[in-house]
Image (tube, grey):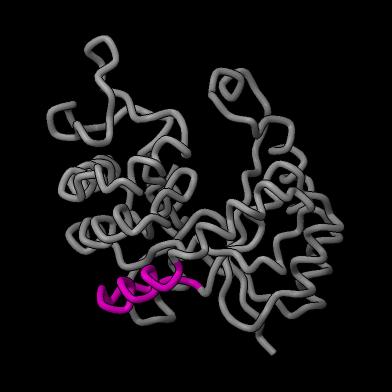
Amino acid sequence: MSSRNPKLSVGCHVLLVDAFPVLEWDKVSSLALANSGVPKFRDSLVRFACVAASRRLNEDEIEAEITAQIRKLQMAGVQVSHLDSHKHTHMFPAVFRPMLRAAKKCGVSAIRNPFEPLFLAGTKNCKRRFQLGILRSFRTSFRNALRESGLVTPDGCIGILATGGLTLDTFRELIENLPEGTWEFVTHPGYYDAELDGVKTRLRHSRENELAILTSPETKELLQGERIELMSYRDFGSSAQLSPEVPAPSGRRSD
C-alpha cells in the first residue's frame, strides 16, 4: 500500500501491550511474559502501568524492541514518518525516553503528543477522564525529554476520550473549540469485517461510524468554516524543516 502511494504518511504504532514482541523473550524479559514458551506482552494497560511505576521496566530492552519494530517496517519498504504507541504507553517516561532514542537511531523525526486537553475531551465518561488526568502528570517530563531530543511533535491530541463513542455533534464541538496550533485527531475509521472480528478490540461498529463522520459533507463544511488545514505527519515534518509523517490527519488553524 505505501509503496503504491509514496505520499501516504505511515507511522509505526509501537506495541508494548496486547501483542507479541518482535525480539526473543530473553531480550525483553521485563516487558513480556513467557507464556508456554511464547513471549507475550502484558494484556492490560493497568498491569503495564504498575510495572512502569515500580521501575521494573528495562529501558534498554524497550529501546531494542521499539527499534526492532521500526526496522521491521523499514525493511519492508515503509518510510516511517512518526511514532505513536498502542494505548499511548509512551506517556510513561520509562517508555518515552527509550522511544526517543530508538526514533533517532532509525531516522524518525516526529512523534505523537498523546496528551489531550480535558476541556476538549468530548465525553462524560468520568472513569476515562480520571485516568487521563493522572497520566497528564507526565506531560512535563514528556516536554523536557522531547526538547532535548530535537524531535518534533504536535501540540497534542484530540478525540482520545471520545474514542468508541464519537458522534457528529461531539466532533463539531471538538473542532469548534480547537485552540490555535497543530493538533492530531485520534480516530479509528474502518470496516467491521471478519478480520476485525478476530482481533481483541472494543472498537468494532464504531469504526464504520467514525468513517461515516469523517467523510460526511457536514465535516468538510465544518473544517472549511473553521479554517482548519488538514495535514499529515509528512507535511508536519516538512514544515518544521525535518522529515516524514502520519496516518491520522492532523489539523491546524490557518487564520
Which residue is located at x 39 percent, y 63 percent?
111
Residue at the far bottom in the pictured view: 255
120 within the magenta span: no
Q: Quadrant of the C terminus?
A: bottom right
Residue 68 image position (x, y, % from top left) = 21, 42
Q: Quadrant of residue 43?
A: top left
Give the answer, above or below, for where 109 lies relative to 51: below
Which residue is located at x 19 percent, y 34 percent?
28
Query: In the visual, does 109 lie left or right of 4?
Result: left
Nearer to us in this view, 166 or 253 = 166
Residue 19 visible in the shown view: yes
Residue at the far front in the pictured view: 54
Residue at the far top in the pictured view: 36
Residue 246 image position (x, y, % from top left) = 47, 58
Give the answer, above or below, for where 46 lies relative to 74: above
144 within the magenta span: yes
Query: In the visual, does 82 lie left or right of 167?
Result: left
Stretch of the chain drawn in magenta: 139-154
Residue 74 visible in the shown view: no
Q: Provide the major secondary structure of the magenta segment.
A: helix
Residue 58 image position (x, y, % from top left) = 19, 45
Which residue is located at x 31 percent, y 67 percent?
109
Which residue is located at x 82 percent, y 50 percent?
167
Query: In the visual, does 34 lie left or right of 238?
Result: left
